[in-house]
């Protein structure tokens, strides 16, 4: 059986002819010449090697094999319509998937609510979120392992297009009994005589602290490094040192662990979180929708 004769136009013509009871009426439904429509029906019958219509002066009538062929043809056309609708959803961004890489600060402070709102509006889009350090995020975007990235300012991002995402504030975290706890505001310089609990050096926050301490010509006294905001707070609560974290992320831990958040008066303590992409024009429709949801400048 020559399957190439089962093209969608011929199947649609066959269904229209069966419903109208006339080849000429079926041809009109598909804007085909009657002669061309007759040839298509004859080719289809030749392909299945059996007549599909009884022909008589008033029109046509399905044979037994024609009735069976009609059921299959309608199912095929319906499947194609569903496929076309789904592909249209992908093209417009109503369906698909987006890969986003984000740093800990954005995940603990802003992204949960932002992503929940996006996914409620676009239930057909699946979001794959991976937590990474800011420098690793830039690499993931550049190497096409992520579509969208959220990372800290000051992170070198050659070749990426960046937009402002959110602002956050870094604060000092100390036990309630610490000598700095009573200070409403403190400068980073005044904290450098104390031992610190910090994130690993590869993180943007640790890099910023090391950079600023070097600029002040006062080495940072690192007592211990841990991998999470929660770990920093727990270590500070036990008296292992003091720490610096984003205010919004630290506030719940401070309340549960009886810690004090002290404002830093250094300009670098006000950070910008950036949204980065390789090329806005090259984003898939779902990725473009997510980027526009996260950043007004992308809309």
Image (spheres, rainbow, N blue to C red):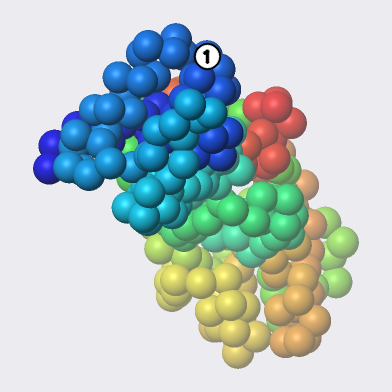
Of 236 and 119, the residue lying toward us: 119
| Quadrant assignment, res 85 | top right
**Residue 67's spot in the image, x, y percent?**
41, 53
In the image, farthest residue toward the left = 1
Give the answer, above or below, for where 166 lies relative to 157: below
Residue 148 seen in this snapshot? no
Label 1 secondary element: loop
- Kindly give the residue lying farthest to the bottom in the view shown: 238
Above-or-below relation of 8 to 118? above
**Residue 234, position in %: x, y?**
59, 84
Image quadrant occupied by the C terminus: top right
Instruction: Indicate the quadrant where residue 177 lies.
Output: bottom right
Residue visible at 65% across and 27% down?
298
Residue at 53% from the left image edge and 56% from the top image edge: 126
Residue pointed to by mark 1: 31
**Residue 185 seen in render:** yes
Image coordinates for residue 138, horizontal then vertical, percent = 40, 39
Identity of the residue drawn at 36% across and 55% down:
64
Residue at 66% across / 34% down in the picture? 292
The correct choice, above or below, for 248 with respect to 291 in the image is below
Crowding at mark 1 (Cα within 10 Å: few <14, some 14-19, many 20+): few
Q: Quadrant of the N terminus?
A: top left
In this view, the residue in front, 164 or 124, is 124
Q: Nearer the viewer, residue 262 or 292?
A: 292
Mark count: 1
Residue 266 location (% of width, % of height): 71, 44
With 117 as the anchor, is 198 left or right in this view? left
């Amino acid at each position: 059986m020559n399957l190439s004769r089962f093209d969608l136009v011929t199947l649609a013509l066959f269904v229209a002819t069966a419903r109208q009871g006339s080849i000429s009426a079926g041809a009109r439904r598909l804007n085909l010449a009657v002669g061309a429509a007759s040839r298509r029906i004859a080719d289809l019958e030749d392909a299945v090697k059996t007549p599909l219509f009884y022909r008589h002066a008033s029109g046509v009538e399905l044979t037994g094999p024609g009735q069976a062929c009609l059921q299959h043809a309608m199912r095929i056309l319906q499947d194609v319509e569903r496929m076309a609708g789904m592909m249209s959803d992908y093209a417009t961004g109503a369906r698909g998937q987006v890969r986003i890489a984000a740093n800990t600060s954005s995940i603990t402070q802003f992204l949960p609510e932002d992503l929940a709102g996006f996914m409620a509006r676009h239930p057909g889009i699946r979001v794959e979120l991976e937590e990474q350090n800011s420098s690793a995020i830039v690499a993931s975007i550049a190497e096409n392992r992520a579509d969208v990235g959220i990372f800290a300012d000051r992170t070198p991002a050659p070749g990426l297009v960046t937009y402002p995402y959110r602002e956050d504030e870094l604060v000092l975290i100390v036990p309630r009994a610490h000598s700095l706890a009573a200070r409403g505001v403190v400068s980073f310089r005044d904290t450098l005589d104390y031992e610190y609990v910090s994130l690993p050096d590869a993180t943007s926050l640790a890099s910023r602290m090391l950079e600023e301490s070097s600029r002040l010509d006062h080495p940072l006294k690192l007592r211990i490094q841990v991998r999470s905001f929660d770990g920093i707070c727990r270590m500070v609560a036990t008296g292992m040192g003091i720490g610096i974290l984003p205010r919004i992320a630290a506030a719940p831990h401070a309340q549960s662990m009886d810690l004090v958040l002290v404002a830093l008066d250094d300009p670098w303590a006000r950070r910008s979180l950036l949204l980065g992409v390789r090329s806005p024009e090259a984003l898939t429709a779902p990725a473009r929708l997510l980027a526009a949801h996260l950043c007004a400048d992308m809309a």
